[in-house]
């Protein structure tokens, strides 16, 4: 009986442990990675690409991130004006630190600035007597952010307790733009002190600490009102104080253990994967992010090490590592139509066992092989590959001497092998859309290079919008792509708003952090043309994205291999004016005969192209049914 009783107790305890484990598995948590000693570990930290800046009350130590070796330090003189530093942040080559006169009254605050190379004090911005004691500052989404703490210990003197602690957003001139207070629940946990550390996380949440509790609080800016919205309370190794995210490996959070005088490096394990999606950040933030990325390399060797890290991160984030086994293509082709200088036929092949990629193959007529081959993924435009301007592009390239394949993105056109196959539901809700479409594009290359008429050394790809995303993705991951023309898509601040572009963590993981500009730069040194316009998220390309990519091409002494054509007064499309430079660039680098489509007046003539009805272009109909091997729903 006693044995049975103890057995029941043991089972109950086991079930409780299992329950707690399951609950915790669905919550965010931190995993400690390493520690190193730092005598300055009193107040907070700041981090750049190679160093950790450990901030004491009146001193700063610069340490190597990898080894923990002290390489420089700064100390205030005994009679100096720096009284109480707190946490800091790096922007370019400057260290910005929060500073106050704590614990003196009345409370005053300032921002103190050092150069990161030698830790020479450079400048100061005073807030005077305003909100309280400045405990941390951060740079996020193109603005400055700072918290001004108030404390229960000064309630009698100032008639303010910690409830007066304030988060303030500033512009570049430190003029206040907006401010918020903290939830009373969190302030009660911080009593009698206040918010000591803060840093904006990779998930766009504000992470904050108290003075001595081993907890981190995450907040969102509220849509209404003036109180920050508490999202989660996460256990943390460090007992409060200043924290700083590593902006180049943004799941890494740095903090301090002031009792042990140690810097603590932890890794965020989020409850859900962090996806950089849509208008994820401001234009200013995108530009500053590229500046931080550029600090991580200074030559070809260093860039190629970063490039390999990015590629591996994309492949793992898209569940393409390892790549799926290449099944037989089993191509289907029928209904060839011959027109002036080109032909069209309806084609499908298996990219995965039982899953078919459907499209149209445009062939040159009246020319001798071997031919270049061009992939033409369509974008998020009505009618997809059947769209008239898509047909014009494909047929004109074929008339110039290229084999061109226009194919459906997942969930479009004839890509119906999903549980819900009506557009846009399947395309936007299929979680692994970016993986499937990218794999399909790789298999398109397999299909095209299997044709005896195709020169496998002359493979190009071009598309706009979502097709532009697919253009730079497949070019980045498949070295068989010789020429790339991504159109109206390469942006430092926009990440695509669809699962086929950003539905999987291809931009951020434990070991990589990037944006679409760097993904496009993985094409280097192969020829690439960026086509941009003033009416969408590529409006800054001539001044932001293109110079960044061109700088990388310079490492290969191939800066003339990358070009940008910008249409400041045009919008988001792949219209005639944008197709012209694409034709010229592809003709130049794929050795196509542009004279075959050039009128006597020197303009590109698309009039011979016959615009077909979609009923002519579909692969599967009553006369050509789906193969018996076709699966009803694809699983990645």
Image: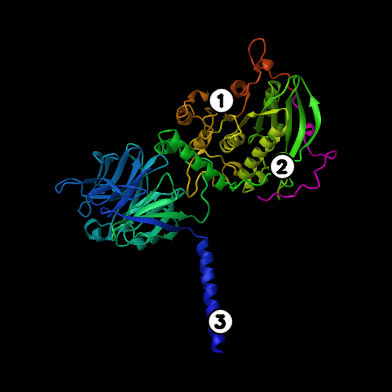
* Residue 479 relative to residue 625: left or right: left
Q: Which residue is mark 3?
A: 8
**Total label count?**
3
Secondary-structure class at tag 1: loop
Any part of residue 217 in sight? yes
Mark 3 surroundings within 10 Å by alpha-carbon count, few (fewer than 14), some (14 through 19), many (20 or more): few
Residue shown at 20% from the left, 53% from the top: 105
Residue 409 in the image: state x and y as whole percent. Answer: 67, 39
Does the magenta segment cover residue 167? no
Residue 185, picture quadrant: bottom left
Residue wearing tag 2 = 415
Q: Of 473 and 608, which appears nearest the observer? A: 473
The kind of secondary structure element at disc 3 is helix
Magenta-tinted stretch = 610-636
The x, y position of residue 69, in whole percent, is 30, 49
Q: Tag 2 or tag 1, which sits nearer the N-term?
A: 2
Would you identify the image quadrant in which residue 235 lies? bottom left
Mark 2 neighbour density, 10 Å: few (under 14) some (14–19) many (20 or more): many
Quick one: which residue is furthest to the bottom in this view? 1
Residue 147 can be seen, yes or no: no
Gap in angstroms between the C-alphas marked 2 and 3: 54 Å
- Can you give x and y, in whole percent of width and height, for residue 258 in the image? 29, 58
Mark 2 or mark 3: which comes first in sequence? 3
- Left of 139 or right of it: where is 594? right
User: In the image shown, does 268 or 175 lie closer to the viewer?
Assistant: 268
Which residue was labeled with disc 1? 570
Residue 421 position in % (x across, y down): 71, 46
- What secondary structure is found at the residue carrying circle 2? loop
Q: Residue 11 lies in what quarter of the image?
A: bottom right
State the separation of the CA atoms marked 1 and 2: 31 Å
- N-terminal label among 3 and 1: 3
């Amino acid at each position: 009986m006693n044995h049975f009783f103890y057995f029941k107790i043991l089972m109950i305890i086991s079930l409780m442990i299992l329950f707690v484990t399951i609950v915790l598995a669905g919550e965010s948590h931190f995993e400690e990675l390493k520690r190193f000693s730092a005598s300055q570990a009193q107040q907070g930290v700041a981090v750049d690409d190679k160093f950790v800046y450990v901030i004491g009350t009146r001193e700063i130590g610069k340490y190597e991130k990898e080894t923990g070796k002290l390489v420089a330090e700064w100390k205030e003189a005994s009679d100096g004006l720096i009284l109480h530093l707190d946490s800091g942040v790096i922007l370019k080559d400057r260290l910005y630190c929060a500073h106050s006169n704590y614990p003196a009254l009345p409370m005053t605050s300032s921002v103190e600035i050092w150069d990161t190379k030698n830790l020479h004090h450079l400048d100061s911005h005073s807030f005077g007597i305003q909100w309280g004691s400045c405990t941390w500052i951060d740079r996020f989404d193109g603005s400055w952010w700072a918290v001004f703490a108030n404390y229960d210990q000064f309630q009698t003197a100032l008639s303010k307790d910690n409830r007066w602690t304030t988060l303030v957003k500033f512009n570049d001139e430190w003029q206040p733009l907006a401010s918020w207070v903290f939830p009373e629940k969190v302030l009660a946990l911080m009593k009698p002190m206040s918010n000591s550390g803060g840093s904006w996380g990779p998930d766009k949440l504000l992470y904050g600490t108290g003075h001595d509790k081993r907890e981190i609080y995450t907040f969102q800016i509220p849509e209404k009102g003036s109180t920050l919205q508490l999202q989660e309370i996460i256990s943390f190794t460090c007992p409060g104080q200043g924290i700083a995210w590593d902006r180049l490996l943004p799941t890494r959070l740095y903090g301090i253990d002031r009792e042990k005088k140690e810097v603590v490096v932890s890794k965020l394990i989020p409850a859900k994967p962090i996806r950089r999606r849509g208008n994820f950040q401001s234009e200013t933030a995108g530009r500053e992010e590229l500046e931080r990325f550029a600090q991580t390399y200074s030559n070809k060797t260093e860039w190629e090490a970063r490039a390999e890290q990015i590629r591996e991160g994309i492949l793992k984030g898209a569940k393409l590592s390892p790549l799926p086994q290449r099944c037989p293509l089993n191509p289907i082709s029928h209904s060839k139509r011959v027109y002036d200088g080109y032909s069209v036929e309806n084609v499908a092949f298996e990219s995965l066992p039982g899953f078919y990629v459907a499209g149209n193959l445009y062939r040159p007529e009246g020319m001798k092989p071997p031919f270049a081959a061009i992939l033409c993924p369509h974008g998020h435009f009505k009618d997809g590959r059947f769209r008239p301007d898509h047909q014009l592009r494909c047929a004109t390239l074929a008339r110039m001497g290229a084999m061109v394949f226009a194919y459906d993105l997942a969930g479009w056109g004839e890509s119906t092998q999903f549980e819900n196959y009506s557009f846009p539901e399947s395309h936007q809700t299929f979680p692994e859309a970016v993986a499937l479409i990218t794999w399909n594009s790789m298999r398109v290359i397999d299909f095209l290079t299997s044709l005896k008429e195709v020169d496998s050394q002359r493979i190009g790809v071009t598309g706009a919008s979502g097709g532009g995303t697919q253009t730079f993705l497949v070019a980045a991951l498949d070295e068989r792509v010789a020429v790339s023309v991504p159109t109206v898509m390469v942006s430092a601040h926009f990440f695509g708003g669809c699962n086929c572009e950003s539905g999987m963590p291809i931009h951020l993981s434990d070991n990589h952090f990037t944006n679409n500009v760097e993904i496009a730069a993985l094409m280097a040194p192969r020829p690439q043309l960026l086509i941009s316009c003033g009416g969408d998220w590529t409006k800054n390309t001539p001044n932001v994205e293109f110079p960044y990519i061109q700088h990388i091409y310079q490492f290969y002494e191939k800066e003339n291999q990358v070009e940008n054509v910008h249409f400041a007064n045009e919008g988001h499309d792949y219209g005639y004016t944008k197709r012209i430079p694409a034709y010229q660039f592809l003709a130049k680098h794929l050795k196509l005969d542009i004279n075959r489509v050039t009128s006597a007046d020197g303009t590109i003539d698309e009039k011979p192209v016959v615009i077909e009805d979609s009923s002519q272009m579909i692969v599967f109909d009553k006369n050509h049914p789906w193969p018996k091997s076709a699966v009803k729903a694809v699983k990645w």
